[in-house]
Image (spheres, rainbow, N blue to C red):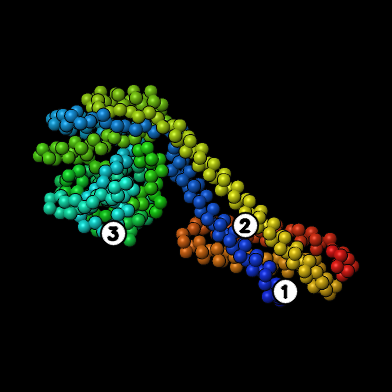
Amino acid sequence: MKQIIREVKENLVKKKFFSILILVQVTMLFVLMSVLFLQFYNVNTKTKSLYGQYKDKNVYQLSDNLFDEEEKSFLKSGDSLGYLKSFYKQLNENTEFTYLVTASQGIGIENFRGNDTFLEGYHSEGGAFPPYEFHGEQYRMAKALQVNEQVFTTFDLKLEQGRKFKGEDYLYEDKKILPIILGADYKSTYKIGDRLKIEYIFTQMNAEIIGFLEPNTVFPVREDFEFYADKHILMPAFTMEKGPLTQENDIFQKRQYLQLVNGQIFTEKDTFQIRKLIDGIAETTQFNYVTIIGANGIGIDLMISMLNQNINLLIMLVVVMLCFCIASIALAFIMKWNIQIKKYAIHIISGANTFDIVMYMFAEVFLLILISLGIAFVIITNIVNMPVLYYVMIAIIGIIIACVGLLPMYFKVKNLNISKMLKKKV
C-alpha cells in the first residue's frame, strides 16, 4: 500500500500536465453529465407524474358561448344562477370523466410586495398592468388560477411548505377568509399565515396564505399542457351554497360559476360519447350555452412523442460523453506509459508483476476521478438539490470510467516483452 501511495504521489507531482489535463477533463465531463442527469431525471419524473396521466386520454375544453348582449341578458335572468350551479355540480361530481377547473383570473392585491414578474400582462407588449383603485384602496393585479380538487389529485401537485386545500375551502361564504397557495417564487416575498386584502371579480375579500408549491410545479391549463405555476397564486374553485342577498352579489355568483363551467374534461372517452354526456347534463340542468372544443388527442400524442425524443437525445449524449472520457483516459495513460517506459521496466526487473503496475495506474486514475467527483458534487449541489440516485449513479460511472479506461493498458502490460522494453522497442 505504501508503494502504491508513493508511486501515485510521484506520478502526480512529476507529470503535472497529464494529471491536471485528466482532472479538468473528467471534472467537466462529470459536471456536464450531472446537468444531463438532472434534465433526464426531471423529464422522467414528468413522464410518470404529469405526462403519464395523458396516456390514452383525451382532453376536451368546455367554453360558454355567452357573449355581449346575450351574456348581459343571461346575467339578468332570475333563473340563470340555479342553472349554472346545477350544471357545475353535475360536471364536478360526474364519475364518467374527470372535470378539471383551471380558471385563469387575476386577483388584485392591496400593498402588493412582489415585483412586476408576478403581475398580469407582464409578458405582453404593454407590460404589467398598472395599479388601480378599488373602494378607495390601491391594488396590483397578480396572476392567479382557480383550481378544483381534481387538479391536485390528477396531477399530484405537491407543496414545499404548508397544506393543500381542504373540502371546506371550496365552499365560500361572505366575510370568510379565503385560503390561497402561492407559487414557489413567492417564498422570498410572503410567508405562511400572511393575510392579504384582495379584489376578485369586483368583490373585496380577505385571504390567508396556507402554503407554497414546490419549485417547477407544472400542470395543464386550458390549451397550455405545460403550465408553470411558480409565479401564480392558486385559489380554490369555490362554490356558494347560499343564494345572493343583493344584486351585486347575484352578478358576482353568476360570474364565478361561469368561470367554473369553462373547464376541461379529462377522459378516455371519444368525442361522440362526451358530447352525448354533456348534452344530457345540459338538458337536465337547462344550461344550453356551452360548446365542446374537440379532443386534443393528437396534440397529446405529439407532446409525448417529442418528450420521448428528448429522452433518447439525452441518453445518446451521455453515452457519447462516457465513451469520450474513457478514450481520453486510455490515450493519456498510453502516452504516459511511453514517456515513463524505463521507470516501469525497472519496477518489473525489481520484482514487480503485471498486477502491481496496473494497480499503480488504477490508484492514480481513481484518485483523480475521486477529486473530480468531489468538485462536481460541490458545484452541482450548490446550484440544486440532487436525488440520492444521482450520487450513486455518478460514483458507479466513475468506477466504470477508471476500469474501462485502463483496460488497454492492462493488455499492454500483460503482453510485455522485457528485453524489447529495455531496448525501447515497445
Question: Can residue 383 be seen here?
Answer: yes
Q: Which residue is mark 2?
A: 397
From the viewer's side, name the closer residue of 141 and 101. Answer: 141
Q: Which residue is mark 1?
A: 7
Q: Residue furthest front?
A: 125
The single residue placed furthest to the right in the displayed view is 419
Residue at point 50%, 42% (across, down): 307
Is the C-beta separation of discs 1 and 3 under 8 Å? no
Image location (x, y in percent) of residue 43: 49, 47
Query: x and y percent of residue 94 in the render?
Result: 32, 32
Inter-mark Cα distance, 1 to 2? 25 Å
Determine whether label 2 and label 3 are within 8 Å by CB: no
Query: Mark 1 or mark 2, which has the lower sequence index?
Result: 1
Marker disc for residue 190:
3
Q: Quadrant of residue 398?
A: bottom right
Q: What's the residue at 44%, 37% (across, down)?
A: 54
Amino acid type shown at disc 2: Ile
Relative to 56, 375 lies left or right? right
The residues bearing labels 1 and 3 have C-alpha atoms spaced at a distance of 58 Å
Q: Quadrant of the N terminus?
A: bottom right
